[in-house]
Amino acid sequence: MNRFLRRLLAPADALLNGLYGWRLNPLYHSGALVVLTFVLLLVTGLYLVFFYRLGDPHASIVRITEQAWLGRWIRSLHRYASDAAVVAVGVHAFRMFAQGRSWGPRALAWVSGLLLLGLTLVLGWTGYVMVWDVFGLVLAREGARLLDALPLFSEPISRAFVGERELPGAFFFLNLFLHVALPVGLGALLWLHVSRVARPGLLPPRGLLWGMTGLLLALSILWPAPAGTPADLLRLPSRGPYDAFYAFWLPITRELPAALTWVGGGILGALALLAPWWSRPRAVERPAPSVVNERLCTGCEQCYQDCPYDAIAMVDRTDGRAGIMARVNPALCVSCGICAGSCAPMGVGPPGRTGRDQLAQIRDLVAARAPAPDDVVVIACTHGAGGVAQESRFDGAPVLPVDCAGSLHTSVVEYLVRSGAAGVLVVACPPRDCQNREGPEWLEQRLYHGREAELQDRVDRQRVRLVYADLAEVGTVAAALELTRRDVGMMGQARREADIVLEAECDLVAAQGLDGRQGPERRQRSQGLEGRRR
Amino acid sequence: MSQPRAWIGGGALAVGMTLALGWLSQVPYDAAGDVDAVVRLAWRTRGTRVEECRRLTAAERERLPIHMRQEEVCQGRTVPYRLVVVLDGRSVVNETVYPSGARADRPLYVYHEFAVRPGWHDLDIAFTREGVPSDTAGEQERERLGERESAAPPRLALTRRVMLGPDRIVLVTYDAEQRQLILKGYGAP
Ligand code: HEM
Ligand code: SF4
Ligand code: SF4
């Protein structure tokens, strides 16, 4: 099912990559966008709470709305940001599920995420009751009806809304208290939510941050949120503006008996909460956590720094030698294999996927079929990479699938170049889309910026290209492959030309006004950079 | 995608999504559906508490431990009421209202809503205490009105012609001070 959902997501990812580039693709930053909306809600909420009056809630909202310079758009921003939060949470949760990030050590994030979602919806609920317009009243009454179906209260709370008497001030006080106190719980839950990821990306990149804030602000100014008709207990709710993000369930539950709503909601909730159990692969297919080979570990701490899930600790050696060594906590390890790519001496990684295993595998492949001198070998992540890894061959190029580009040990690249491949094209997911969070980022640094377990200087960088492509971005990979082939082809030609007697060649160049050697090299350099920038 | 096309497409998509967000944040929705006006019955009364007592026979007393050998055993309960509502000549409710709570010792709650068309409507409501079980030979029944002043009278009734405007709710409720059913809301004459 995950694969099917991932395929649904892929065209949207590809479209937005085309429009905004992967750095600013909002779909890749859904979690961070939720946090951004929370920040906007906090700032605007602090302003609003100064003007809110428990004694006459709706009138105070109207007064805020009448403050043309500040109140109106601040209130609107508060509302639209809360709506954007629901959208972003929806995308984020869907994405995590589609990418199969709902089980194993991620179960804590999954379950706490669902609680965050629930809390967000309840917060919205209390927010609308605070406004105390028709919509607020309908929400309050529906909430009371549902709560009355539970054996919680000695007296039905729905009675407060029949119109016998005015609502007690205590009701609005409790509601306000919840609306102010729940965000504290939200903060604590968020901390728990990201507690198992190292370096959580809590805010989106600047362009996206200001872009989204600007759009919501413009909407707030140009289309301020209405303050609906005041609630009246003895009047039918008139046709009015309803927030579909917080009341999408209302038209359904109002038609159902309260008990059925609880049963239905309970089943859905339980199904979602149990996803870590039912969505995980079968036991035999579940990848095993990483292990450290103590004999090989030098205690360099690189894997400890690179692990995106803080699953590695540095501990005192147990093999009698002095110093420290890495140890993997299997309860935290998601088996992403990124540590395998971090470790120069190849002393860590999931069983069968360490640097040593990767080298052995590539040796066997090369022994079976050595790359032709004009072959560009594609190394592709199985999760994205324009779907390359799903095809055994891509436009005739030999393809080596890896579980995560970040788990690739750079010695594999070196081995391929040394065994005669004209070039190596590494296809990784766009960094913010990495199933394992930081794989492509670390890989890029290992290939080009000397991050530990780096690609050795002796490997000609012009033969190695890194391209980022989402699952549906087949075209991106095809273009990169073509470019790499052309470049290495030109390098081959340049080398052959270098063998020609230089004087004769210089005469020719002088006669034709051409510089046959510099062109491809210069182009090569700029394209190499472009590969990194994309 | 070429740069200008990406700019235009990206801008249009962002603006479109923002507008969609704004619209979905205030969708016109009619929570009342096709209901035009409502007659609502809603009240809460303390029920009448009765204790049914019975003299124990000599044999029954023999079986009890010495310190529990009373002459009389009593069992208390709150008596249910019968609610009969006739709206425009049609009987719409005819039911027994039992006291709430697991031990049936909590107040009685009445809650009914009837969708009606705006205009004049005839309401005839009777809320009558169900019969207290009659004495059986040799058994003495004592009725104690627990919390005498707050318990509802044995019979509450209201017969009235009411006018309801569009979207109006007329509420029939129990006024504990006047100890009678009263009308509230826009439709009340
Ligand atoms: C409501 C507010 C939520 C916020 C603010 C939020 C925010 C975040 C953030 C910032 C991350 C870290 C992303 C990273 O740096 O890689 C994250 C990870 C995660 N979120 Fe959420 N999230 C929310 C709700 C949810 C929901 C509803 C779910 C699913 C039901 C969910 C599932 C996950 C999972 C599974 C991860 C871990 C990903 C991994 O370990 O690879 N989140 N979330
Ligand atoms: S990267 Fe390798 S050598 Fe360095 S600490 Fe980790 S396991 Fe040990
Ligand atoms: S495989 Fe390695 S990098 Fe990945 S979570 Fe496990 S220990 Fe961390």
Image (spheres, coloured by chain):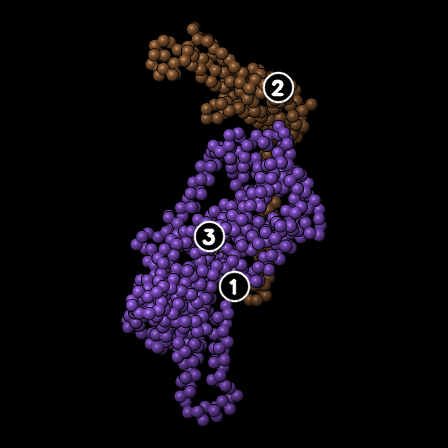
Q: CA distance from mark 3 to mark 1?
A: 26 Å
Q: CA distance from mark 3 to mark 2?
A: 56 Å
Q: Amino acid at mark 3?
A: Leu
Residue ID for mark 2: B179
The reply to whether dot 2 and dot 1 touch (C-beta < 8 Å) is: no
Beta carbon at label 1 within 8 Å of ligand 1: no
Rendered purple, the chain in question is A
Closest to the camera, between mark 3 and mark 1, is: 3
Answer few, some or many: residues within 10 Å of disc 2's Cα (few below 14, many 20 plus, some between 14 and 19): some
Name, please, the residue furthest toward the front.
B67
Task: Name which quarter of the figure residue A388 lies in.
Answer: bottom left
Of helix, strand and loop, which one carries label 2?
loop
The residue shown at (30%, 54%) is A284
Q: Which mark is residue A23?
A: 1
Q: Is residue B131 above or below residue A335?
A: above
Is A70 situated left or right of A298 in this image? right
Q: Is residue B176 above or below residue A202?
A: above
